[in-house]
Amino acid sequence: MHVQSMAHSLSPGSAPAPDIINTLEESELSRLEQKLCDQAPLSQKARWLNDYLDLGLELACRAGERRLTRLQTSWVQRLYQTLRASALSHDAPLGWRSLCADYLYQPYFALVHLYRINPACSQQLRYLTHEFTLICQRCRQAGKENGRGPH
């Protein structure tokens, strides 16, 4: 059944039910997250990574528009944690780790923004900033050791 027709059949009105869309999009995000762990050419994984970040940040924006700050933060944290784990994984090829480290700034800056607007998150902001700095240093060091040079 087509997504929109399924949504129309479950809710009155002309727009698809937001919960159904979010569930489908969350499933797609999970599917992309799993694909990022698959063995595939770096060029293919880079496309999946772009799609993953686009969808995850879109979900976070929508949560923010609905004033669901915890959900918004959760989406961005998920992106950050996934990229952080890949960037630091010793099992992953250097090219993939470097790509994840290069893209990590996107969820990092989104989290910095979310933590700055919430005074209760000042400790998380300090921890995140410290961690991000260490990750950048480690990735630069790994690049130098493998002849890649700094990012």
Image (tube, grey):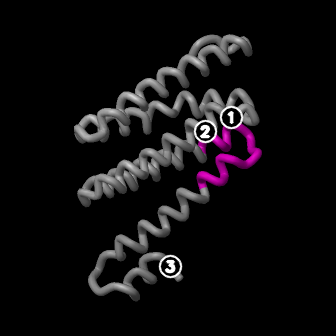
Is 12 on the left-hand or right-hand side of 109?
Answer: left
Q: Earlier in the sequence, mark 3 or mark 2?
A: 3
Which three-letter amino acid code belongs to the residue tagged 3?
His
Which three-letter amino acid code belongs to the residue tagged 1?
Ser
Q: CA distance from mark 1 to mark 3?
A: 39 Å
User: Which of 17/4 is in front?
Assistant: 17
Quarter where residue 109 is shown? top left
* Residue receiving disc 1: 89
Quarter where residue 34 is shown? bottom right
Q: CA distance from mark 3 to mark 2?
A: 35 Å
Query: Does the magenta stretch mainly form a helix, a strand or a loop?
Result: helix
Quick check: 38 above or below 26? Answer: above
Q: Residue at x 52, y 33 (%)?
A: 103
Q: Residue at x 35, y 32 (%)?
A: 125
Residue 134 in the image: state x and y as whole percent: 52, 21
Queried whether the magenta region covers residue 34, the answer comes back as yes
Q: Quadrant of the C terminus?
A: top right
User: Which of 29/75 is in front?
Assistant: 75
Span shown in magenta: 32-47
Determine the secondary structure under disc 1: loop
* Residue receiving disc 3: 2
Residue 114 in the image: state x and y as whole percent: 30, 41
Q: Residues within 10 Å of mark 2 (few under 14, many from 20)?
A: some
Count of marks, rendered view: 3
